[in-house]
Amino acid sequence: MNCEHGAALLEHLGQGERLSTAFGGTPHAERMTGGKTLGLPDEPPQAPPILPSEESAPRAGASPKVRFLIRIERRPESERISWMPDIYAIAYAVWHSPGGSFSVRATSTHCHSRRKDPAGPGGGNLGSADALRDRPPARRGRASRLVTQAGSAAPAGNALVGGPAAVAAPRLYWQRFRHEATRALESRGWEVQFSAQVGLKPLVFQTSSWSAEIVEEARGWFQLSAGFEIEGEKFDIQPILAALVSNRFLEMTEGMPRGQEFMIFLPDGRGLALPVGRFRHLLTTLGELMEYRFTGGPIRLSKVDAAQLASDEALAPKTPPEIHELAVEVAEFQKIPRQPQPAGLAATLRDYQLDGYYWMQHLARHGLNGILADDMGLGKTLQTLTHLLAEIESGRHQGRPSLVIAPTSVVENWQREAAKFAPGLKVRVLQGPDRHRHFPSLAQVDLALTSYALISRDLEQYLAQSFHLLILDEAQHIKNPGALVTRTVGQLRAKHRLCLSGTPVENHLGELWSLMHFLMPGMLGTQEAFTETYRTPIEKNGSDAKREALAHRVGPLILRRTKQDVAKELPPKTEILHAIQLSESQKDLYETVRSAMDKQVRQALAMQGVESQIVFLDALLKLRQICCHPSLLDRQPDGAESAKFEYLADMLETLGEEGHRVLLFSQFTSMLSLIEDHLTRQEVSYLKLTGETKNRQELVERWQGGEGSVFLISLKAGGTGLTLTGADTVIHYDPWWNPAAENQATDRAYRIGQEKPVFVHKLICQGTVEERIQQMQARKDHLATDLLSGATQTLSLTPALLESLLAPVESPK
């Protein structure tokens, strides 16, 4: 008993001389005419195979020579049967006998069935084309995975060649065979002929036919049109890239040689062979710009993206002169024109400050916005004032005022810096209860200053005015895209926007997106697309490629110099970590509280609610307070011992004897009060600044004038906006998560204007949560030194984290 396929095969073989042929006979040999050509019952007489001529036969006495030939034919319409293939292959073996005659063996075969091959790719007859390839086994395996993506049917324009789809569609299989297997067979000595009735010649991409052009669409936006021609027919790049995305091309071709080709199919069924390397590059580069959503037509580009694509060798677009000029300046910073300093500047800029000024002028000239991300203390305010003066003196401001929004504590610093370095500017501070009386004359000033705290309240007044420059100082205040202040500043009208921030990325890359969305809306796409394209691969998967791609994309709009970059213009800074062992009574208290809080946190964590976060933070707070001084805890006696406090007292005495002036930071104002009491008892002169201080600038001037040997400062109130270069020593009494906060506090003393070496001391209780936090901070600090790698997730409560932070006190090693 046989299945229908077996019965059909037996019937087919039983006709004529087919059975003899199947068992190696050569019944067709006698049909040769004059020993030159061969006719077959199933082939049209007008298209015989081209066999060797007598002239090519070897002479008598020579060794026999064998030639192999494969002929691809289409069955005539009159001979087609539903279950037989329309296109088939015939293999010939031709022997030249020593006497000069020919011996021919012809075997009719086929590499395609109308039914889906249950063996799948690599099985049945389909695998024969793959088996012919000159590839190592691993490469053949990758090819098998690639060809299976089309599924059981071939979606119009999207299917990659091969697999079950090829078995179901003769045009797909035979085009692949013609493009790939033919060369593999020829490399092994076979001659392959395709009958004119077969056709099925795939299209092949040629580099010489490629063309691309960038044209201006609207102010600040451009269009990219790209494609190629094959035999006079034009192909646009977008539908091609859309087909590659839908078939997971990047995943399927990962690791393939750049010169290898792959095939897609057009809606009309024609195959198109494309080089892997070039189209991987095009899909990756344009995909990140388009969020991998190719819809047809021109590709929309921001001016920065257009400039970076202008120098892309694979794309090689024709560009407008403006984009070409920008591309040159983006590629090489030194090509940015060196503008003369404005006449109204009452300062001498350092070299790196001049570079910052040139860079801001470069942005304005090209209609771009950006982030000046220099470290604290390198003179971002001075560089920005220089830029503003140049815009006014050149007339580019067209009579419009500029607006600076800064933290409340920093607004006065802007007023002082403007008066000092740009005395000719007409400056208006819009703060205080009487600020509204100045709004009617806003258009007459050069520079208006206000705070983040007031901008939302006064938004209506500001919307009535268009500004030349809109400058956000400490721009991390808009790092949350959903915050009211972020939405408010985004509504203001200005020709150019500029962000100033030493820490544009403090916790995660979403903060960078928020700043860039304010500066260049749409450039990084939607928040959701940015998360999918960059945040998740970088923050969760650690993708260096994505990190480099993002840095490359936003790099032209961010200028960052660290103190290490300009170290020759600053005295040295030395950081010293002091590990202090808890006293016995302090250690007992720490263990008692730790054990109780550990149990509470684990119980709260089991509930998986907001309460667990609150309980956890409360536990950390209590343990940190014990490390600082047990008396900070409720119901603890004032006379409790504190090893760290005693260590500090000895340190301050030594520093005082050596003539050093000290900035002492703590996050706990109650701790500052304890230190203040100690300084009073020791008759040490000091100043103190907390959130309750009203006369901040007066204290700064007194300190800079030489008053006091110790300046007590709460980290939150005095971490930014102050110049305290009168100090040469900084002490951080208690550490916390974000190294940027500590660095900013240190920068009160370590900044331009400092002439003495600065020493930074960090006091850590050994084996406690403080030391573990310091270790976490050090890991984060390594990332924070890179603008884009500072992206780390917020703290999530996991058993491993609890085990680390709430573990018992470790004994010193």
Image (cartoon, helix red, strand yellow):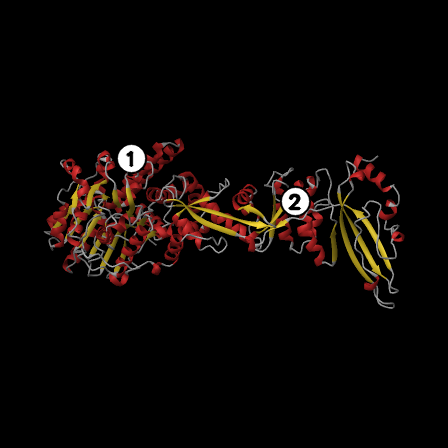
Checking the image for residue 786, the label placed there is none
The answer to whether mark 1 and mark 2 are in CB contact below 8 A is no
Checking the image for residue 162, the label placed there is 2
344 shown above or below 639:
below
User: Hey, which quadrant is residue 5 in on the image?
Assistant: top right
Of residue 46 and residue 684, the one placed in the foreground of this image is 46
Q: Position of residue 246 (x, y in %)?
A: 55, 41
Is the C terminus in the top left, top right, bottom left or bottom right quadrant?
bottom left
570 shown above or below 484:
below
> Judging from the image, what secondary structure is the residue with disc 2 in?
loop
> Judging from the image, what secondary structure is the residue with disc 1 in?
helix
Whether residue 690 appears in this view of the structure is no
Q: Residue sitting at 14 percent across and 54 percent down?
A: 704
318 shown above or below 16:
below
User: Hey, which quadrant is residue 332 in on the image?
Assistant: bottom left
What amino acid does circle 2 point to? Gly
Q: Position of residue 131 (x, y in %)?
A: 70, 51
808 on left or right of 248: left
333 on left or right of 105: left
Whether residue 155 appears in this view of the structure is yes
Which residue has dot 1 on it? 484
What amino acid does circle 1 point to? Leu
